[in-house]
Image (cartoon, grey):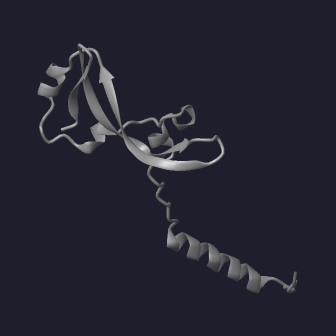
Amino acid sequence: MRNANVRIRERVMTAKLYDLPTIVEVMKTTDRKNVYEVADVSQIMVCSSTADSSSSERMPKTKSNKAYQWPNGLTPPMKNARKKRFRKAIKKKYVDVPEIERELKMLLRTDIAAESVRWEIITI
């Protein structure tokens, strides 16, 4: 239900409703000093003069919401915000535990075999 027909005077245009990557606060002022919040905008309607009725017929009814996500914000710094700022977290690569244990044992053996070991505690 994200498709619509918008009529401006005698002209009829097709429109789609998209979700913005972030919520935008709309502010208003009366005296250029005091500002107050009017609304929160989270969706945008994109109108086009060409009729896309053929493409809407081809799409299945159970279309995911990912197709209706707008990639950009409203301002130029928010271009590709969905890709840049909300990307998936990189998984940590875990090192082999046996390899670490082997290295630790080798360091301890060389420490025991050393002629003299000197250490000191430095307080900052």
Residue 35 visible from this viewpoint? yes
Q: x, y (%) of residue 45?
A: 33, 32
Please give the name of the residue rendered at 48% of the width and 35% of the height, measured from the top-left corner: 74
Please give the name of the residue rendered at 63% of the width and 77% of the height, measured from the top-left corner: 104
Q: In which quarter of the image is residue 71?
A: top left
From the viewer's perspective, is residue 13 above or below residue 66?
above
In this rendered view, identify the residue nearer to me: 7 or 121. 7
Q: How many marks?
A: 0
Residue located farthest toward the front when viewing the structure as drawn: 31
Q: x, y (%) of residue 67?
A: 28, 37
What is the quadrant of the N terminus in the image? top left
58 on left or right of 10: left
Residue 86 visible from this viewpoint? no
Please give the name of the residue rendered at 16% of the width and 27% of the height, measured from the top-left corner: 56
From the viewer's perspective, is residue 45 above or below residue 107?
above
From the viewer's perspective, is residue 9 above or below residue 94?
above
67 on left or right of 59: right
What is the quadrant of the C terminus in the image? bottom right
Q: In which quarter of the image is residue 5?
A: top left
Q: x, y (%) of residue 37?
A: 50, 50
Q: x, y (%) of residue 43?
A: 36, 40
In this rendered view, identify the residue nearer to me: 48 or 33. 33
From the viewer's perspective, is residue 44 above or below residue 42?
above
